[in-house]
Image (cartoon, rainbow, N blue to C red):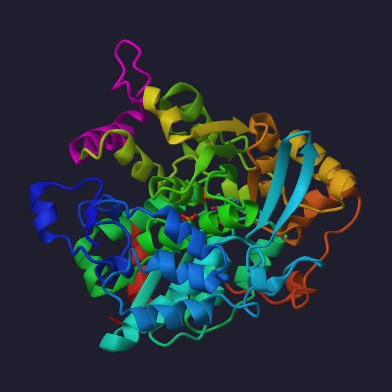
Amino acid sequence: MQYVSTRATAESSARNPNHFSDILLGGLAPDGGLFLPAEYPRVTGAELDAWRTLPYAGLAYEILRKFATDIPDADLKALTAKTYTADVYRNARAGDNPADITPLRELERDGDKVLVLQSLSNGPTLAFKDMAMQLLGNLFEYALAKNDDELNIFGATSGDTGSAAEYAMRGKRGIRVFMLSPHKKMSAFQTAQMFSLHDPNIFNIAVEGVFDDCQDMVKAVSNDLSFKARHKIGTVNSINWARVVAQVVYYFRGYLAATTSNDQKVSFTVPSGNFGNICAGHIARMMGLPIDQLIVATNENDVLDEFFRTGRYRVRKSAETFHTTSPSMDISKASNFERFVYDLVGRDPERVRALFRKVDTEGGFDLSGAPGSDGDEFAKVAGYGFASGKSTHADRIATIRNVFEKSGLTIDTHTADGVKVAREHVRAGVPMIVLETALAAKFNETIVEALGRNADRPSGFEDIESLPQKYVVMKPNVDEMKTFIAAHTGL
Ligand SMILES: Cc1ncc(COP(=O)(O)O)c(C=O)c1O
Ligand SMILES: N[C@@H](CCOP(=O)(O)O)C(=O)O
């Protein structure tokens, strides 16, 4: 399997490494684009039939081997078997089977309209990020051990990627984690989860800004190729292709668990911010998974909803990005959107370069086809199954309440955004799977507001907010960030 950059030039393609293991440890392509397979592997009906009875680890192996063709099959099988166990994904709800890894349960039914919840948040940090990050930790360790090498992970988080990465990389030989987060903008639980880690290889940096400021710095450091090489910088954000491909697996799992025959279709609603999760759904669909709709659900930070309604992509500045009660989706510049746009414009890297140059210079682009716009590809969006919707704080509170009243389940604030939007798009006869992207315990403040009581807490997290915290506060300044990293890598 060969990989290409969304911004490839003839010159950068000649220089790009292009196998899975070559791109595993890095983030952005050297030309500033994002890696994607040169073409998506197709899945046959016979394969889907055979996969229906596989456990999650077996399914992950079958899907990943189509992309990681340069990792020996036996090694990949061992890595997926070690990752996807009931012991790692041990926080399943009472009544769900932890061995399912991503259990499904019916949430509500109105005639032939059915909403199903797929739990992705049963891993060590109670968010869907663990689904890919646990595998990434094992893949990194495997790749580094081969060359006796080391890796300095530089990442950005709005609350969940950070803790998932730190829990996955704790104690891993040769790996340090430098994690940027927006100062005082995560929930108390998320903050405590990260900042209470005192491991010598974990560095938490609270940035005076929003998530997009953090992500911009990760990209700026990644684009300084000599700094990146000298300090062995890698990334765990979804700009890293391995993160996205590991997320493709649970779309297959959701489909197979919700259907009995390949003639049936399902739809997915995905609480979205950086567009990594739903991008994995897009890839699953491109591989031939019978997905009807892919619904993008945003919170008040509605850049993506605006695009999927109008064809206009208009990023917001930091000061225009709202701090909401689904804080992990407080994102106004969605990294992975570029991967979708690459497909939408016919995989033309020159177009992608021009469009994202316009994002940098003018704050966005317009594919609506209106006079003066940058193209008319918006007309093709529905053909990819995409539609969208938006949810606000009031919607979130009402949804948490009425889901609890109807089903007895307590859902988190991001999942509530998903359920609210899913109800607007569900079609008769096509199960709508809502991805549960975090557990309610992470956002207790809002659960108390909605339900008048605390969210249940999985064991091990009882007093997490009272633990001593270790972090530094910094301004969003790339040079200062580089100095900080250099001082701690000793390279
Ligand atoms: C709980 C939760 N829900 C949804 C999202 C949005 O996912 P994505 O950024 O992949 O669109 C995030 C952050 O990524 C998250 O942490
Ligand atoms: N919501 C995320 C933001 C980063 O997303 P990623 O998928 O690109 O790592 C978070 O919780 O950190």
Q: Which residues are magenta?
A: 349-377
Residue 351 in the image: above or below residue 229 = above
Residue in the picture at 57% in, 52% down: 255
Q: How many marks?
A: 0
Which residue is at the front of the view, 284 or 404?
Answer: 284
Quarter of the rendering occupied by the N terminus: bottom left
Residue 474 visible in this rendered orientation of the protein = no
Which residue is at 29% across, 87% downward?
146
Q: Is residue 293 visible?
A: yes
Image position of 435 with respect to 1: above or below: above
Q: Give me the residue at 31% from left, 36% from top.
A: 360
Horizontal side, residue 460 vs residue 479: left or right: right
- Residue 186 x %, y %: 63, 55
In the rendered view, would you say 12 is above or below 302? below
Q: Is 328 inside the magenta-drawn segment? A: no
User: Which quadrant holds residue 148?
Assistant: bottom left
Residue 345 place in picture, x, y as percent: 28, 33
Question: At which x and y percent is residue 185?
Answer: 62, 52
Q: Quadrant of the C terminus?
A: bottom left
Query: Which quadrant of the figure has residue 35?
Result: bottom left
In the figure, 339 relative to 426: above or below? Answer: below
> x and y percent of residue 37 in the render?
28, 55
Query: Would residue 256 be found to the left or right of residue 317 on screen?
Result: right
Q: What residue is shown at x 63% (from left), y 43% (from top)?
A: 323
Residue farthest toward the top in the current orientation of the protein = 371
Viewer-closest of 59 and 407: 59
> Which residue is more in the foreground, 467 or 341?
341
